Amino acid sequence: MIDEAQLRQMSPEERRQLARALAAIDMPRPLLDPTLRRRRQLGLLVLMGCCIFLAVWIAILMLELPRQFTASHWRGVWVGLDIAELAGFAATAWASWRQRQVLIFCMVFTGTLLLGDAWFDLVLDYGSSGFTMSVLSAVFAELPLALLLFTGARRLVRATVEVVMTLEGVPGKVPPLWQVPLFADGLAETLPARFRGEEAESPVTGSGGISS
């Protein structure tokens, strides 16, 4: 049994090796679960099908849609969008106040709504008297708020990855998110050398190992 005094006598690299060994024992790799693997394969097929369908649909729309169209329920569309944005901001505020992981989802959701709002304002008001106001609204309100929300969500995800790296004994700085494996499974092995830290490149041997 290793007590706290023995842990404090270990070097940082020894503690990282111990943390990796414990994580491998206590946290089996999720992607080895056959059910999860089947769901992942199904999800990939659905996503590929969506990409193909949307590519074809976009081409059809570019050829078939009229340049002008009179829409009904115009008020309901915009009021509904603003209600969705209000719900997004309220949910984001609640999740931030309660410090819940759903905050990341709420921030991405609300930021996406803001981008959609800015896009439709600019495109639909182009050439009209309201275009200037749409540009000002996008530049000084919707786009900065969306950027703030996306940046905050990214920082929270990176902070979560940093905690996982610490618990698993993976040294070095948090890499770009596109390099981080799902579930952080095999994170240390997939990182470029510059993100692993100097200590990870020269493993401890001899009397400096965990077993000493």
Image (cartoon, grey):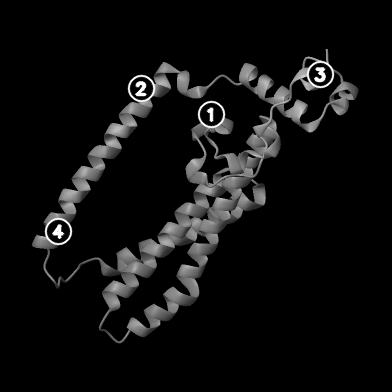
Image coordinates for residue 115, horizontal then vertical, percent: 40, 63
Q: Nearer the viewer, residue 165 or 114?
A: 165
User: Residue at position x 48%, y 53% from top?
Assistant: 108
The residue at which mark 1 appears reads as 185
Marks 2 and 4, how far apart at CA: 34 Å
| Mark 1 nearby-residue class (10 Å; few <14, some 14–19, many ≥20) | some
Marks 1 and 3, how far apart at CA: 29 Å
Label 2 residue SS: helix
Examine the image and state in which quarter residue 130 appears: bottom left
The residue at which mark 4 appears reads as 61
Give the amino acid at mark 1.
Asp
The mark that comes first in sequence, 4 or 1, is: 4
For the N terminus, the quadrant is top right
| Residue 83 visible within the image | no
Label 3 residue SS: helix
Image coordinates for residue 89, horizontal then vertical, percent: 52, 59
- Mark 4 or 1, closer to the camera: 1
Examine the image and state in which quarter residue 72 appears: bottom left
Image coordinates for residue 183, horizontal then vertical, percent: 53, 32
User: Which mark is on residue 207?
Assistant: 3
The mark that comes first in sequence, 2 or 4, is: 2
User: Which mark is on residue 38?
Assistant: 2
Left or right of 130, for residue 5: right
Marks 3 and 2, how far apart at CA: 45 Å
